């Protein structure tokens, strides 16, 4: 029931001219504020572009086959970063060996079994607090527990366990999201056929959620690969030319190598190109994995909405 | 059914293989055998050394000589490679011995230095096989558990309940880890309060941990942490919330599709890379533009931290804004409010609890972030008097000094105590955020 008057007159209380001016002002304010918001988004995009662009511009020249496949030489002022790449690879995959089974099983409990209540609330509080613990505190914990008490020493094993604890919340979160995206009808169909809950989970829900879980583990690996403070005291060393032969050996790692070269090297200015190169390799690794994860997720969402 | 037993057989065979592999790994390699021989020979000769270091040198010389001799017996082409491998192996072993010596500090009572060396060699060889044993053990136990479950022919309900308990136990790991973190922080941090009172530790103005006696007052570090967190929040909160509002309410879906991944990528940038950028680009820029003594300062660190916490603030706020029921928005628009007025008076107030949670989580991320403040905050342990003053926040102090602090010295305990303070800060932030999120949860359209 729209009356003729309101459609023509902007306001029943103000003279027509004043009302129109007021509406124009409201519209102008809205346009201005929305541009401000748009500006905020652009600032973020600009920050990302500037950082990546800067590293590409300066780091690309440092990267060649030798840089990627050789060990550092001449007190780390020449040579490549192969031991660091290998170390980062071992540490991040090691962390997934720890975090993936624990994280997936936790998520299955939280999403498939748990009923709302005090216990669920407590577990969720534990997970969110674990996600909030600073990485340097994880480092301290790793040093006191894995390195000292368990006698693992500064080693791949200690680093992978520390990083595993650190990435556990990431894996739980993404796995739960994956389980949530499995339509409820799948479960009902399976249960309706007489399958038990475990049969339903293992034969119906998990296969359907697998791509999402894969995304989660990729995100976990990329998080672990970029982490520095947690491995400083537990796994990474300043310099070792040796290729690790067991999980009790220490390693070099890309993020720690950047930190060392940029702050504690003997000739910080002289090794600038190595620093740019190492940083570029690290972000290529991390952002590449994230892009893959974003891509898989987008495809999954499209499949879900179809 | 047959496939099940095949799988069990395969897993058990794998476990056995791992176990045997572990036994091979436990056997001493060339270098370790020679080292043990030398250590035993020197010990038998009654040689007493004041420090492990001297014994080490002796053993090292002996091993090098022996390896040289052995290389000579081999065909020349292989000898070089063999010698290099063995030398690397020796370096590795020596590193272990040195590490162990450094961590224990002094010789244990009733041990000769060479006895210590021999112990370490033995332990290292044993440790090599421990990993294999553990893996084999876990594999075997799991397989046997599966087999038992099958063989017991439990009722379906019982088996299901067992499986559910297994999942519950795993889900509690997170809490267990959190408790372990607390336990070890307190175990290694509380001893510092034997030498300094809690008040003096928290409110002391001087942080000179390497002096004798050490001055352990962390007020400048706490002030540094609070200063960078506050300043970075000042930048990150408006930026993050505005971005969230734009993405959730204003942007067209196509624009969203572009900017959402950008925010996610910003979140995934490793902190060390952001710190590095702050060091080589932002610091010289600040120094020139503002004519300050150093570009590595409070402002630089806050700016870099802001870009680390924006993605957290944005994604959590965005979810909160999404969760506002459409009815509220439609009602406001139908009353004649513009989109902006609807945002300001209806949508943002309705999602305020979510936005507050986002802000607190963002601040918690800034206060705990390590690499950025370690690299760009300047590192001066003073209470900041201007935004261009260099500071030393708590995480930076822990990361920078842990490498130098002697094992279980007062300095070492003090760094763990800083870890406790940091942990408590973030714990409080997270619990408050969690409380707000649950307490003021928007349920349905009728709660406004």
Image (cartoon, rainbow, N blue to C red):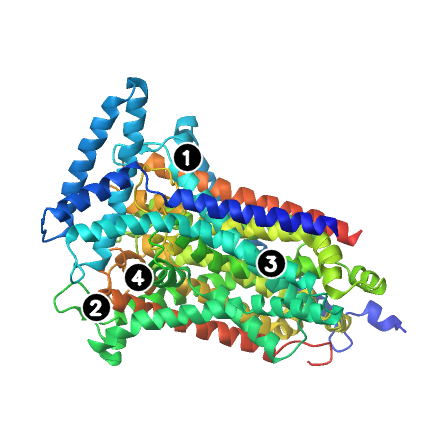
Same chain? Circles 2 and 4 = yes
> Which of the two discs, 1 and 4, sits closer to the camera?
4
Q: Which of B408 and A275 is in front in this view?
A: B408
On residue B410, the disc is 2
State the image coordinates of residue B26 (x, y, percent, origin top left): 37, 46
On residue B398, the disc is 4
Q: Which chain carries label 1?
A: A
On residue B144, the disc is 3
Disc with the residue nearer the chain's start (3 vs 4)? 3
Q: Residue at x 50, y 59 (%)?
A: B310
State the image coordinates of residue A56 (x, y, percent, origin top left): 46, 36
Disc with the residue nearer the chain's start (2 vs 4)? 4
> Which of the two discs, 1 and 2, sits closer to the camera?
2
Q: Which of A50 and A278 is in front in this view?
A: A278
Distance Cα–Cα, label 2 vs label 4: 13 Å
Q: Residues within 10 Å of mark 3 (few under 14, many from 20)?
A: some
Badges 2 and 4: C-beta atoms under 8 Å apart?
A: no
Q: Residues within 10 Å of mark 4 (few under 14, many from 20)?
A: many
On residue A241, the disc is none
- Residue at which label 1 appears: A59
For the N terminus of chain A, the quadrant is bottom right
Distance Cα–Cα, label 1 vs label 3: 53 Å
> Which of the two discs, 3 and 4, sits closer to the camera?
3
Badges 1 and 3: C-beta atoms under 8 Å apart?
A: no
State the image coordinates of residue A63 (x, y, percent, origin top left): 42, 30
């Amino acid at each position: 029931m729209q009356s003729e008057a309101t459609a023509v007159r902007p306001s029943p209380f103000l003279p027509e001219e004043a009302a129109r001016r007021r509406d124009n002002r409201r519209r102008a304010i809205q346009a201005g504020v929305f541009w401000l918001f748009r500006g905020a988004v652009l600032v973020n995009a600009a920050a990302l572009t500037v950082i990546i662009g800067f590293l590409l511009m300066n780091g690309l020249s440092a990267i060649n086959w030798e840089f990627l496949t050789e060990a550092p030489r001449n007190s780390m002022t020449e040579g490549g970063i192969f031991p660091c790449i290998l170390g980062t690879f071992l540490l991040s995959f090691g962390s997934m060996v720890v975090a993936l089974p624990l994280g997936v099983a936790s998520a299955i409990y939280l999403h498939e079994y748990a009923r709302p209540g005090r216990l669920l609330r407590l577990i969720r509080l534990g997970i969110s607090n674990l996600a909030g613990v600073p990485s340097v505190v994880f480092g301290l914990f790793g040093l006191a527990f894995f390195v000292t008490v368990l006698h693992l020493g500064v080693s791949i094993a200690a680093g992978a366990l520390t990083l595993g604890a650190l990435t556990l919340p990431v894996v739980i979160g993404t796995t739960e999201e994956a389980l949530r995206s499995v339509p409820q009808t799948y479960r009902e169909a399976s249960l309706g056929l007489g399958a038990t809950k475990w049969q339903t989970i293992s034969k119906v829900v998990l296969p359907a959620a697998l791509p999402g879980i894969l995304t989660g583990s990729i995100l976990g690996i990329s998080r672990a690969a970029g982490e520095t403070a947690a491995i400083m005291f537990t796994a990474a060393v300043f310099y070792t030319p040796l290729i690790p032969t067991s999980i009790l050996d220490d390693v070099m790692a890309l993020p720690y190598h950047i930190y060392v070269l940029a702050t504690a090297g003997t000739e910080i200015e002289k090794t600038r190109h190595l620093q740019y190169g190492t940083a570029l390799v690290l972000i290529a690794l991390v952002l590449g994995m994230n892009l893959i994860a974003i891509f898989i997720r987008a495809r999954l969402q499209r499949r879900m909405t179809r | 059914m047959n496939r099940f037993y095949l799988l069990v057989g395969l897993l058990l065979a794998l476990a056995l293989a791992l176990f045997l592999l572990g036994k091979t790994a436990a056997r001493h390699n060339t270098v370790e055998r020679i080292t043990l021989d030398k250590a035993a020979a020197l010990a038998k000769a009654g040689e007493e050394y004041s420090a492990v270091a001297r014994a080490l040198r002796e053993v090292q010389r002996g091993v090098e000589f022996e390896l040289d001799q052995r290389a000579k017996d081999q065909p020349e082409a292989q000898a070089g490679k063999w010698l290099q491998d063995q030398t690397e192996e020796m370096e590795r072993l020596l590193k272990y011995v040195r590490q162990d010596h450094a961590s224990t500090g002094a010789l244990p009572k009733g041990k000769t230095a060479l006895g210590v060396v021999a112990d370490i060699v033995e332990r290292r060889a044993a440790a090599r096989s421990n990993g294999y044993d553990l893996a084999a053990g876990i594999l075997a136990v799991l397989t046997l558990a599966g087999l038992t479950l099958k063989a017991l022919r439990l009722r379906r309900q019982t088996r299901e309940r067992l499986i559910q308990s297994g999942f519950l136990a795993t889900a509690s790991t997170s809490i267990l880890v959190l408790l372990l973190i607390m336990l070890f922080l307190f175990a290694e941090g509380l001893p510092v309060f034997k030498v300094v009172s809690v008040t003096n530790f928290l409110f002391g103005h001087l942080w000179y941990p390497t002096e004798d006696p050490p001055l352990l007052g962390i007020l400048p570090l706490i002030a540094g942490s609070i200063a960078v967190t506050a300043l970075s929040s000042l930048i990150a909160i408006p930026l993050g919330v505005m971005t969230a509002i734009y993405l959730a309410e204003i942007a067209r879906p196509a624009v969203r599709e572009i900017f959402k991944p950008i925010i996610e990528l910003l979140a995934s940038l490793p902190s060390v890379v952001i710190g590095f950028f702050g060091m080589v680009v932002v610091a010289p820029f600040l120094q020139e533009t503002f004519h300050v003594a150093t570009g590595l300062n409070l402002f630089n660190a806050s700016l870099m931290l802001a870009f680390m916490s924006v993605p957290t603030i944005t994604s959590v706020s965005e979810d909160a804004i999404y969760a506002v029921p459409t009815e509220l928005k439609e009602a406001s628009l139908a009353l004649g409010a513009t989109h902006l007025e609807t945002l300001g008076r209806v949508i943002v107030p309705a999602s305020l609890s979510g936005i507050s949670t986002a802000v607190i989580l963002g601040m918690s991320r800034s206060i705990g972030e390590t690499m950025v403040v370690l690299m760009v905050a300047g590192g001066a342990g003073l209470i900041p008097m201007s935004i261009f003053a260099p500071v030393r926040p708590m995480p930076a102090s822990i990361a920078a000094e842990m490498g130098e602090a002697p094992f279980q010295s007062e300095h070492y305990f003090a760094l763990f105590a800083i870890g406790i303070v940091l942990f408590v800060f973030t714990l409080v932030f997270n619990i408050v955020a969690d409380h707000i999120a649950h307490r003021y949860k928007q349920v349905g359209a009728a709660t406004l």
